[in-house]
Image: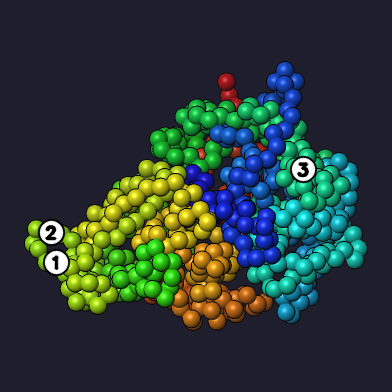
């Protein structure tokens, strides 16, 4: 599957404007597609030569910039990871590790205060930026100050009151409330710490030179960017890891044609293809020179989202005549054959799932496809067939609608996903009709589905019965991601349209206590227990109906060694370890 941050990308189109006006309020998910100035780039005649032993990675478009806090296309994270080191990161095993920090601040070592409001980072000594300037705690403070002064939202930064720098190797971060993902505060998917001496004024992040001409604490430095042609990277002479990177040159070539990228990969003229799709993907799977790497676990989860409030009311106090009944949600889920969805819409490449939290190892009973159970639940709720020639059920004593009301639901998907989602939506329509539910399928642009309240966003305004889309969370701890969707306090309303993304208008008071506990420092085993308790409740209540996990895929030429894709970071997280076995053959 292609990189598809779906909901987090499109919701930030509404979040940027909100944040510019009220950055202290609860904020929407991470940024996307912020317009940036176009850099002045050298003419092709002055191009840096591509070495014979260069690692070649074709990508379809230029990265918007090197600042992955400002955009979310996937390509800015790809190159940002090469130059902007993080205080800490997450490896393929899901465990945190220090990068620019000397160690991980925890309760056990005193780096995290008992109340979780103070985090003390100790930095590795002797780290230099690629231009020779020392990396210090001032860079950490500058990074936070820039978000504050530029009024740009990024996860957790709005919860920080101050960053103290008692000495060059110590940064003390003071939060106003505990941030469960604090270990990735200055790291994560292509993000890290900015150079205070190079980027520019703290209130001008959108216009920084370092968005296009970075200095580096990472393994590589930008040698040249020929827009529309390629980005060329050389080893960082000041990289703090001895004898790394292994590659002498890393090149991102701009190649929009997926079949051209595939042929170059098979011939060894390119070495890594990101998120290939069919038909190129099938060719790669059957080529002896290429391996297709599939991330496991997967990050994105395709889910059916029911609106528990009356259509158009956006008011949880006005229940939906069908979907507010948990038995009806159970009936819908039992009517969906997830294995058929996988085979016919996703060619068997997805993973059936019952939870967003499968990577935590929570033990949940699997949901089974059972149309008989579905029909029994619908009958019990008072929706019955009234005409042998009409497959649609009608209210007959349902108690939530007038008798004779047809069981018809309006369901949306977003067109940017592509034909696979259209196919999945059509199959769900067929499956639900088998049990007497008529689905009226609608396809809209994502910006319509996830727009602001003021701009009549379909979900925020509650103008839907069901939606079908995919999303997932970065990092290890899903607390804030899950709270945004399921905490009863994150229901958007007319008076508070940015309260959160609980667009199902799902209210389970038990979850308030669980989320309050998760928002405080806890031992790892206690946190996992609470999250699995949350997963169990969500599986019972079905405010979202998880269907399929969608792995990322990467085509890798067998000559390229050391690539370890995973869901917690961009694929270039360990680019310092990449190397070629042999140069490409003509």
According to the image, label 2 marks what residue?
Answer: 390
Q: Is residue 26 left or right of residue 392?
A: right
- Given contact means CB atoms under 8 Å apart, are the residues at marks 1 and 3 in contact? no
Where on the picture, by quarter, is residue 479? bottom right
Residue at which label 3 appears: 208
- For residue 385, the mark is 1
Seen in the image, is 10 located left or right of residue 45? left
User: Helix or strand or loop: what does disc 3 sit on?
Assistant: loop
Residue 571 at x, y = what percent? 60, 47
Dot 2 crowding, Cα within 10 Å, few <14, some 14–19, many 20+: few
580 lies left or right of 11: right
Residue at 21 percent across and 64 percent down: it is 406
Q: Secondary structure at mark 1?
A: strand
Sequence-first tag of 1 and 3: 3
**Quick check: marks 2 and 1 in contact, CB under 8 Å?**
yes
Residue 160 image-quadrant placement: bottom right
Q: Give the Cα distance between marks 2 and 1.
A: 8 Å
Residue drawn at point x = 80 percent, y = 42 percent = 215
In whole angstroms, how far apart are the C-alphas of marks 1 and 3?
64 Å
Most foreground residue, 99 or 544: 544
Q: Check residue 396 in the rendering and tell me which mark sits there, or answer none.
A: none
């Amino acid at each position: 599957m292609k990189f598809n941050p779906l909901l987090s990308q499109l919701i930030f189109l509404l979040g940027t404007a909100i944040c510019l006006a009220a950055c202290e309020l609860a904020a929407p998910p991470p940024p996307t597609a912020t317009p940036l100035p176009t850099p002045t780039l050298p003419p092709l005649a002055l191009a840096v030569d591509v070495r014979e032993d260069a690692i070649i990675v074709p990508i379809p478009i230029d990265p918007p910039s090197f600042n992955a806090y400002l955009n979310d296309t996937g390509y800015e994270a790809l190159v940002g990871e090469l130059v902007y080191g993080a205080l800490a990161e997450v490896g393929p095993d899901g465990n945190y590790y220090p990068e620019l920090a000397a160690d991980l601040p925890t309760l056990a070592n005193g780096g995290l205060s008992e109340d979780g409001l103070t985090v003390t980072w100790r930095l590795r000594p002797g780290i230099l930026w690629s231009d020779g300037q020392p990396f210090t705690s001032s860079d950490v403070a500058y990074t936070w100050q820039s978000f504050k002064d530029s009024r740009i939202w990024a996860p957790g930064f709005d919860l920080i009151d101050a960053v103290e720098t008692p000495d060059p190797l110590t940064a003390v971060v003071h939060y106003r409330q505990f941030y469960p993902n604090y270990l990735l505060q200055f790291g994560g998917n292509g993000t890290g710490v900015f150079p205070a001496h190079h980027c520019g004024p703290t209130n001008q992040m959108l216009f920084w030179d370092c968005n296009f001409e970075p200095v580096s604490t990472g393994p590589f430095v930008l040698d040249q960017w020929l827009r529309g042609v390629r980005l060329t990277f050389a080893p960082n002479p000041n990289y703090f890891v001895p004898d790394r990177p292994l590659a002498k040159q890393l090149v991102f070539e701009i190649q929009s044609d997926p079949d051209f990228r595939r042929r170059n990969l098979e011939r060894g003229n390119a070495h890594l293809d990101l998120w290939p799709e069919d038909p190129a993907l099938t060719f790669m799977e059957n080529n002896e020179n290429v391996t297709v790497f599939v991330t496991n676990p997967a990050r994105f989860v395709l889910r059916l989202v029911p609106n528990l409030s009356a259509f158009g009311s956006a008011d949880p106090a006005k229940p939906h005549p069908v979907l507010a009944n948990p038995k009806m949600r159970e009936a819908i889920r039992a009517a969906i054959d997830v294995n058929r969805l996988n085979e016919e819409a996703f060619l068997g490449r997805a993973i059936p799932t019952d939870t967003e939290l499968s990577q935590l190892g929570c033990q949940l009973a699997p949901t089974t496809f059972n149309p008989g159970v579905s029909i029994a639940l619908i009958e019990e709720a008072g929706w019955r067939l009234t005409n042998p020639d009409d497959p649609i059920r009608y209210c007959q004593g349902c108690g939530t609608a007038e008798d004779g009301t047809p069981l018809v639901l309006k369901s949306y998907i977003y067109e940017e996903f592509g034909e696979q989602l259209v196919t999945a939506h059509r199959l769900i329509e067929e499956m639900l009709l088998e049990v007497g539910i008529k689905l009226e399928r609608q396809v809209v642009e994502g910006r319509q589905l996830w727009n602001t309240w003021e701009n009549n966003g379909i979900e925020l305004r509650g103008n839907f019965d069901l939606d079908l889309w995919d999303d997932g969370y970065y990092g290890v701890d899903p607390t804030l991601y899950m709270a945004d969707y399921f905490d009863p306090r994150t229901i958007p309303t007319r008076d508070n349209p940015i309260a959160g993304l609980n667009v199902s208008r799902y209210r389970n008071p038990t979850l308030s206590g669980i989320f309050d506990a998760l928002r405080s420092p806890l031992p790892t085993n206690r946190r996992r227990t609470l999250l699995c308790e949350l997963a169990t409740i969500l599986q019972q209540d079905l405010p979202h109906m998880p269907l399929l996990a969608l792995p990322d895929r990467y085509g890798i030429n067998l000559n390229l060694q050391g690539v370890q894709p995973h869901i917690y970071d961009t694929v270039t997280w360990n680019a310092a370890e990449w190397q070629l076995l042999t140069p490409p053959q003509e």
